Amino acid sequence: MDKTIFALVIADQSINMVLPGHLAGGYLAATALIAVFHPDLSTSQINCLLIIGTLAGELPDIDLIFFNLAHRKNQNIESHRNYLTHMPLFWILISMIIVSVGFIFNSVFIEYLGWITLAGTWSHLILDSIEYGISWLAPISKKNFAIKKNIHKEDIIYRQGSLLQHFHFITTTYWKTTTIWIEILVSITALTVFFKSF
């Protein structure tokens, strides 16, 4: 039965910030960038950038699709954070390409799209660096950097990568971590900033 469950959000025997925290982080990063630089854009363009920034906060976890598919074949796969989309350099390159396209076509919106993508994706990487760690120097070095190296081992009861295992992780392990409290703080801050903008 659980083989039919396809999870985009999974637990990989490590501390995972879940979807709301990453979306909130992306929103705050985009809001901060816009507040600091005050781009000369229309309200609809600013709103579009805020939406893109919010989604960019979750974008590095797109690798969970490939991780889940690979994990079905090989149970000894390490972590989805070893994939390309969790490398800071990858997002620098993607963002600089977008900024360059904006510069070439003299589009402030496209330039800010690149900067917002960088801010949102890096908010994800920073939040992942709280307890699990990110290979900030990849591909030069695979060494993980974390603020607080505190990986809680979870009991694997359901198929690794399934929604059932993810919910088991959330209810038995995740609430004991520092990460969840930071995620709650980031989410409350994002909601406060959002509602104050009206």
Image: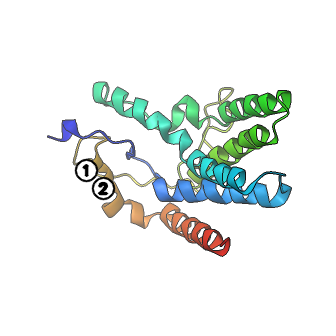
Q: Position of residue 91 (x, y in %)?
A: 67, 35
The image shows residue 176, relative to residue 19, as above or below, that is below
Residue 190 lies, with reference to residue 137, above or below; the image says below
User: Label 1 sits on what residue type?
Assistant: Leu
Along the line of sight, the residue nearer the viewer: 154 or 193: 193
Rendered location of residue 156, percent (x, y)? 27, 47
Which residue is found at the position 78% from the left and 28% from the top?
101
The residue indicated by pointer 2 is 167
Question: Which quadrant holds residue 76?
Answer: top left
Name the residue rendered at 25%, 50% in the picture: 164
Residue 57 in the figure: left or right of residue 174: right
Crowd tier of the residue under label 1, counting other residues whose Cα lies within 10 Å: few below 14, some 14–19, many 20 or above? some
Is residue 79 shown to the viewer in this render? no
Residue 145 is tagged as none
For the residues bearing labels 1 and 2, Cβ distance under 8 angstroms: yes
Callout 2: few (<14), some (14-19), or many (20+) C-alpha neighbours within 10 Å?
Answer: some
Q: Residue at the spot x=62%, y=68% of the render?
A: 194
Q: Amino acid at mark 2?
A: Phe
State the image coordinates of residue 39 (x, y, percent, origin top left).
83, 52
Q: Which residue is mark 1?
A: 164
